[in-house]
Amino acid sequence: MLPHDFPEWDIVYHYFRAWKQDGTWKNIHDTLRGKLRKKVGKNSEPTAGIIDAQSVKTAEKGGFVAMMLGKR
């Protein structure tokens, strides 16, 4: 599924794997991300992060056993 002007897939994969292992891929990603953030008027590095978590309460149903009984 590579564009027609790319080399054969195994050559592309070889370079991707080598660059991923030696950190080049991360450096490319971080550099491009920083440049894009600056272009849209933000700091090159994020200053905050959002973590979202969801908990599912099972105590109201009676836990795993009650769920299994309900399926019967």
Image (cartoon, grey):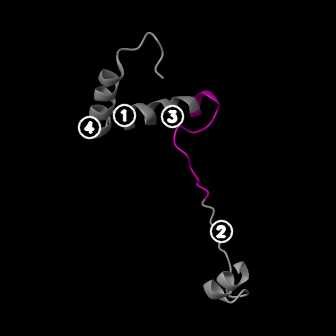
> Which residue is label 4 attached to?
22
Alpha carbon distance from label 1 to label 4: 8 Å
Residue 9 pos. (x, y %): 36, 22
Identity of the amino acid at label 2?
A: Gln
State the residue in front, 49 or 17. 17
Alpha carbon distance from label 3 to label 4: 20 Å
Numbered badge on residue 25: 1
Q: Is residue 24 left or right of residue 68?
A: left
Which numbered disc, 3 or 1, marks the residue closer to the eye? 1
Identity of the amino acid at label 4?
A: Asp
Residue in view at x 33 percent, y 28 percent:
13
Asked if the residue under mark 4 is in contact with the one under mark 1, i.e. CB atoms within 8 Å, the reply is no
The furthest residue to the front: 72
Which numbered disc, 4 or 2, marks the residue closer to the eye? 2
The tag earlier along the polypeptide, 2 or 3, is 3
Numbered badge on residue 54: 2
Identity of the amino acid at label 3?
A: Gly
Which residues make up the magenta segment?
A: 37-50
